[in-house]
Image (cartoon, rainbow, N blue to C red):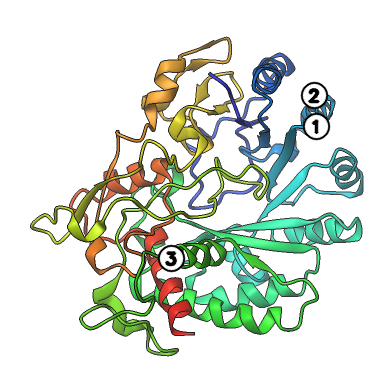
């Protein structure tokens, strides 16, 4: 198998204690250089054999707690012949100083920062907000582009408009994405962290409105990952009118978002081709959506009103993990299909020296997971952009009765309705 997306955890330790962290194992430890090198050799071998690009992501835990290993990995990636391998780091930015920022810039490491809102929201959600914003300023002084990852939870859902204003004042921040809360790790069983469906719709609507205002004043507009994904999906709409017809759900007017609860989207989403060049933090990016060959309206609806569809089509995997091309390596050398699966016993597929390649390929294969949702009422029916198989599995295990619409679907459906109405 070829590894095209490698995630390295230099350590599982972190200086913060975010209540929604998906780490299952909080024991620190440190990845040995020999483990990192063995993993990087797999990537280099794959690039040489196939000529296809690859990406190496430093995550965790907080990778900047092990700065020498971060630099070692960055140097090794930069030295892989052909320039076909990129390197990124996802950090809380609390330990970024001038020297580390200079090193990241020197080795062209793409930087993603975890930020959930303005300082007061960041302090409540993660803590150490002052240190995070100092790190962001260090990156700004060095003119290092940054993409922000925001975990959507009950802690910040009412402040999403303020997020746009905050990021708008940081010219080196090029874009951001919303990562929905996943009920694993620290968030397992934490219903208090799950935002209500009405709050998500209202928050996304506020963010959509504020972002337009912020971008009107910026030289370079902020790029919202989910908004770009939805716009691309709408451009690839099935034949026929874009606007809803009689009997179909109507888009919400500003200020009236709570009235569309009955038309929330499905959790059936079409996978997207991986795009190695547009992201820094997750196991795979959300690529440009393509038309779904599956007709959502024609599929089986169970007694709960949920439509049952396979998560992915064989020829359109949502992410590298869905086709066994993603590998996440824990500090002790154990390996998993993606970063979110690290520490999950059911997802462990050996060690870096003895990878179970068949198990890796099967773990999130296209025919393993089935989603349930009211697809027949979804604004993106027949053109859904896709969803993370690991997140889908976690949501299904936490909501056995399928009472909740997945947050990813709420985000995308709301955006689709707002875009159709505009």
Q: Which mark is residue 80?
A: 2
Residue 398 appears in the rendering? yes
Q: Residues within 10 Å of mark 1 (few under 14, many from 20)?
A: few
Q: Which mark is residue 412?
A: 3
Q: Viewed as shown, does residue 274 lie left or right of 78?
A: left
Determine the residue located farthest toward the left in the rendered image: 303
> What residue sits 34% from the left and 58% below the top?
406
Residue 416 lies, in percent from the top left, at 43, 72
Q: Residue at x 84, y 25 (%)?
A: 79
Q: Which residue is mark 1?
A: 83
The answer to whether mark 3 and mark 2 are in CB contact below 8 A is no
The answer for how far apart the CA atoms under marks 1 and 2 are is 7 Å
As displayed, is residue 124 above or below residue 103? below
Disc 3 crowd, CA 10 A, few/some/many (<14, 14-19, 20+): many
Disc 1 and disc 2 in contact, CB within 8 angstroms = yes
Which residue is most to the top? 354
Q: Position of residue 241 (x, y in %)?
A: 36, 76
Q: Secondary structure at mark 2?
A: loop
Left or right: residue 408 compared with residue 113 = left
Is residue 345 something one can see in this rendering?
no
Q: Nearer the viewer, mark 3 or mark 1?
A: 1
Q: Quadrant of residue 150?
A: bottom right
Which residue is depicted at the point 30% across and 70% down? Answer: 264
Distance between the Cα atoms at labels 3 and 2?
38 Å
Percent position of residue 62, x then y: 67, 41
């Amino acid at each position: 198998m070829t590894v095209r997306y490698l995630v390295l955890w230099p350590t599982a330790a972190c200086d913060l204690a975010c209540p929604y962290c998906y780490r299952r194992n909080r024991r620190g430890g440190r990845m040995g250089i020999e483990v990192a090198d063995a993993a990087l050799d797999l990537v280099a071998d794959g690039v040489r054999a196939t000529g296809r690009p690859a990406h190496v992501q430093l995550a965790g835990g907080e990778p900047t707690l092990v700065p020498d290993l971060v630099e070692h990995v960055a140097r090794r990636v930069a030295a892989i012949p052909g320039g076909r391998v990129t390197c990124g780091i996802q950090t809380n930015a609390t330990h970024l100083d001038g020297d580390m920022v200079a090193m990241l810039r020197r080795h062209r490491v793409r930087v993603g920062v975890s930020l959930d809102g303005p300082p007061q929201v960041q302090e409540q959600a993660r803590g150490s907000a002052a240190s995070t914003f100092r790190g962001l300023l260090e990156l700004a002084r060095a003119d290092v582009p940054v993409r922000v990852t925001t975990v959507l939870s009950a802690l910040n859902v009412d402040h999403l408009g303020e997020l746009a204003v905050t990021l708008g004042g940081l010219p080196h921040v090029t874009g951001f994405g919303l990562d929905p809360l996943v009920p694993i790790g620290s968030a397992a069983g934490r219903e208090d962290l799950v935002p209500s469906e009405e709050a998500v719709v209202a928050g996304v609507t506020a963010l959509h409105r504020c972002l337009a205002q912020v971008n009107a004043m910026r030289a370079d507009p902020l790029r919202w990952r989910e908004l770009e994904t939805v716009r691309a999906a709408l451009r690839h709409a099935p034949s026929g009118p874009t606007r809803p017809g009689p009997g179909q759900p109507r888009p919400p007017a500003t200020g009236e978002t709570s009235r569309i609860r009955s038309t929330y989207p499905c959790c059936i989403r079409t996978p997207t081709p991986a795009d190695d060049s547009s992201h820094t933090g997750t196991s795979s990016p959300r690529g440009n959506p393509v038309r779904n060959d599956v007709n959502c309206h024609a599929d089986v609806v169970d007694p709960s009103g949920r439509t049952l569809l396979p998560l992915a089509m064989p020829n359109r995997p949502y992410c590298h993990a869905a086709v066994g091309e993603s590998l996440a390596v824990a500090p002790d050398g154990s390996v998993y299909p993606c970063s979110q699966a690290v520490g999950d016993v059911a997802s462990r597929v050996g060690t870096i020296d003895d990878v179970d390649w068949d198990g890796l390929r099967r773990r999130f294969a296209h025919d393993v997971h089935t989603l349930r949702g009211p697809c027949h009422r979804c604004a993106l029916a027949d053109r859904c952009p896709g969803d993370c198989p690991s997140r889908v599995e976690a949501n299904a295990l936490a909501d056995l009765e399928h009472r909740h619409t997945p947050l990813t679907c709420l985000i995308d459906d709301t955006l689709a309705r707002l875009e159709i109405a505009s």
